[in-house]
Amino acid sequence: MKTDQPILLNVESPQRLSAMTASRRLRFKETGLLGVLLVLGLLLSLFCGSLEVPNRDTGGVTTVNKFLRADNLDNLAKNTSFFAIMAVGATFVIITGGIDLSVGSMYCLAAVCGAMFLNYFGPRGPGAGASPFWVVPGAIVICLGTGTLCGLLNGLGVVFLRVHPFVITLGTMAIYRGVAFVMTKAQAYTHFPEQFTDGLIRHQVNWHGANLYPVPLAMMIGVTVLAGWYLKHAVTGRHIFAVGGNEQASLFSGLPVNRIKVKVYAFSGLTAGIAAMIMLGYYGSASSDAGKGYELDVIAAAVVGGASLVGGRGTALGALLGALIIQMINNGIVILNIDQNYSQIIIGAVIVLAVLLDRINSTLRENRMARTTLAAKESRQEVASKH
């Protein structure tokens, strides 16, 4: 006897459809950023003009593009590395719906602590005879440890004091820089062991007559790759998105929300420490003025890279691309001989534009979710009416 079998329709829930399309939106966002980089690079190449430089091989001069010359691109990569690394850490915080205004001050304090240590064991310091085999690792641990400790204190303040992250990090921004000022008495610390500077961070590679410094670029790429893998594949990385997407639902689901928040702020401090370590090795000095105003560039890089200030969205690659776009703008201002005071105006406008576009995108996404919910409801009703 033949019986009618129920027809089962594969109707996806709105939440599942949203999750399926989230990665596509992020890939589209990053592809768009790559497009912006290409257009910006093309414009700078066309309008920055050329420059005559000595040719060491022939003894004559060679005409090169001001923007595309090797030393300028290396300088661009070096400048980007500081901000991109910190922007990756800031992205973690922003994904959870928080904000970290103290990133520049954490960078400063980590740099000052590392600089005082390196100066003490440097060629003109009291500990000049110390072995570099433990001085160099010690400086690295101090920079990274100081940054992580500052970030940890931010996270604990946000969680246990239950004060908005804006207020907590605004306060610690002043506290950390004040501590750095008291420690240094407004003096710069220099004369580091060359094993840390030229032997590590400022290691040179000669390429077609240009001295390049690949270590900052390599560290920036390494941090971005590891952070991107963590957000995409690690379970705790997905928990960060869950907290930013709906903190209340995450609590009801049993996620350790407070612990996750503390971790992301500690990671933001860690990235500030890494950036401070690179700066110490590259420039060979530090003072209490280090990193002043970096908060604007770091948060701008994260937002331009696709991190939503309401939480729930962001990528490490997007943070790197956002930092690169901002540094390309700054680099273009210098090459075109434009008053550098305009750079802050441009960056501020970029932040406003990025937030506006994010708001428009959020509205469109909410409308799509509403239509998806309605379609799924109608489909279920249709299946129920047939049976």
Image: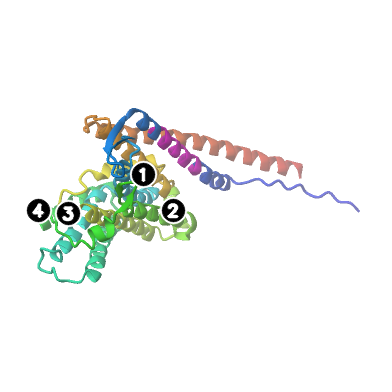
* Front-most of residues 180 and 330: 330
Q: In this view, does 172 lie to the left or right of 83?
A: left
Counting other residues with Cα less than 10 Å from the Cα at mark 1, is it few (<14), some (14-19), or many (20 or more)?
Answer: many
Q: Range of the magenta residues?
A: 26-40
Q: Distance between the residues labelled 4 and 2?
A: 38 Å
The numbered mark, 3 or 4, whose residue comes first in the sequence reads: 4
Q: Residue at x 48, y 43 (%)?
A: 26
The residue wearing badge 4 is 187
The residue wearing badge 1 is 302
Q: Is mark 3 on a helix, strand or loop?
A: loop
Q: Is mark 2 on a helix, strand or loop?
A: helix
Q: Is residue 31 magenta?
A: yes
The residue wearing badge 2 is 228
Foreground label between 1 and 3: 3
Q: Distance between the residues labelled 1 and 3?
A: 27 Å
Q: Is residue 138 left or right of residue 25?
A: left
Circles 3 and 4: CB atoms closer than 8 Å: no
Circles 4 and 1: CB atoms closer than 8 Å: no
The numbered mark, 4 or 1, whose residue comes first in the sequence reads: 4
Magenta stretch prevailing secondary structure: helix
Q: Can residue 273 be seen in this view?
A: no
Does residue 204 lie above or below 299 as drawn? Answer: below
Q: Is residue 353 left or right of residue 15?
A: left
Foreground label between 3 and 2: 3
Foreground label between 3 and 4: 3
Q: Which amino acid does label 4 sit on?
A: Gln
Q: Which amino acid does label 2 sit on?
A: Gly
